[in-house]
Image (cartoon, rainbow, N blue to C red):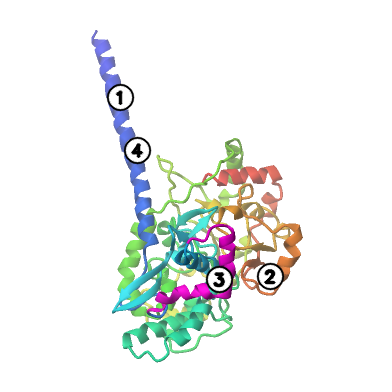
Amino acid sequence: MKKINLILITLVTSFISLSTLSKASNSKESSRVEKHANAAEIFTNWHFFENGRGMTISPNLSRFMWMLGEDPQAKEFKKELIAKKEYENKADFVTKFISKKYGFVIKEEKLMGVFNVQYKQMDVGVLGCTACHSGKAAGVFVPGLGNKTIDTYAISRDVGRIQRFWGWGNRNEDYKYIHEKSMNFAKVTADENISSLTRGLVPDSTIKTFFYKDHGIDYPKDMGRAQVKAPHLWGIKQKRSHGVFNDGSLSGDSYAWIFGAELFASDSGEHLRAVLPKIKWLTDEVLGNLLPPQYPFEIQKDKVATGKVLFENNCMKCHGEHQRDQNGHPLYLAPKVIPKHIVKTDEEKLKAISPEFIKLVETGSLRDILEFKEENIQKGYFAPKLWGVWSRFPYMHNGSIPSLYEVLLPPSERSAIFSMTDAGEEYRFDKERVGLTLFNKNEYKRKEREAKRGSREIYWIKREGQSNQGHYFEKSFSKLTHSDRLALIEYLKTL
């Protein structure tokens, strides 16, 4: 009888322990998901406008954005919407037109990353982080994903033209302070010598212009563009200590490099110093809680196991393990920098960290808070962790490969041109190859001519800094069959 009672007590105790562990586990899982949701909400509403400083357009200009609806292109777009029965009202139409023309993402009828801030009795149009660092993939809005359709050149070109006349004659000192910075922002970003050449790319060269100005000299027109797609931000907290962004050459120890785009836009080192505590908090407590997006469609589970083995044999050496916690959430680990002679992808971005640029930074007014990761300078590029990789197309640091399938092909078999129009929408998503749909044979020649004429809607690998060479490893990739590639892609969908 005593034995039976002891067994019963043991069973009850074990059940209670398992129940407690299960509740604790569910609580932790819920906590991680809740933290992500809170982080996403904070980040999508975040900007660094402070005391008249930040990425802005001229004060009060935002009140008249409805005028864009009178643009000839807008009128054609209006006809399209009416034909599709998608025209609701003028305000909704103007929002959709701005999104279509300049690449801002719409969520809940609002342009992401665009804010109207009241400052000293003025309406100041302010750009926030999410203009470039939140985007869509397969129709899904993803906080922290690089915006695939943003066109910084077109925005600045058009805003600059309007602002030239808008600011004429206004003598209010507060107005003039913001207006002059807004004009410089537009002028630099729309400089055809250093601007991006294709929608969806941003030029790191614009950040360099601050450091020339810091020394009171004009920036050279031949310093290159250093075009990159806006990086995704989940896992940046762990990545930061090993170097910032694509090549790891910028030290993340002081957090200050993360302010790069704002730095050149506001033209103010004082602005950076003023908001540095906020940058640190945003990086660690907000971005540090973002989770990668889950693949939104059905995954062929019978292929995943095969794909995992192929990943371990062909990809893990560079990209490393992808570990999860007990609730299945990713554990972010530091990436490796792969030497340029191995990865062989376009080197334009690496050349941006030149000896001249390093000297400008190290002798400038911000030398105490901006440092380099010297061992990574011009070494190569990160082999990033592949969490949420399904959403991060087009691939490579310069967005030169439209799908995961083509990443596994020889460069000679990859697409030379592909469309960036509506790149984040579901109708543009290729579920089998994971990435962008391509031009069909009937339209290819015409689209190629448009690319050669400079269409910003079409990615063309012959443009400066947009080569699709590299990331092809003959010994392993040449052995992959069509079925192998598809199986590997099914596994990558699970990350």
Q: Report helix, strand or loop for mark 3.
A: helix
Image mark for residue 74? 3
| Residue at screen point 42% across, 81% down | 182
Q: Quadrant of the N terminus?
A: top left
Can see residue 353? no
Q: Nearer the observer, disc 3 or disc 2?
A: 3
Check disc 1 and give the amino acid type: Ser
Real-space Cα separation, disc 3 to disc 1, in angstroms? 68 Å
Q: Nearer the viewer, residue 222 or 47?
A: 47
Real-space Cα separation, disc 2 to disc 4, in angstroms? 52 Å
Real-space Cα separation, disc 4 to disc 3, in angstroms? 50 Å
Q: Which residue is mark 1?
A: 14
Instruction: Specify start and end residues of the magenta stretch as a single range.
Output: 60-88
Q: Which residue is mark 4?
A: 26
Q: Report helix, strand or loop for mark 1.
A: helix
Q: Between disc 3 and disc 1, whose residue precedes? A: 1
* Mark 2–mark 4 CB contact (< 8 Å): no
Q: Nearer the observer, disc 3 or disc 1?
A: 3
Residue 2: say if magenta.
no
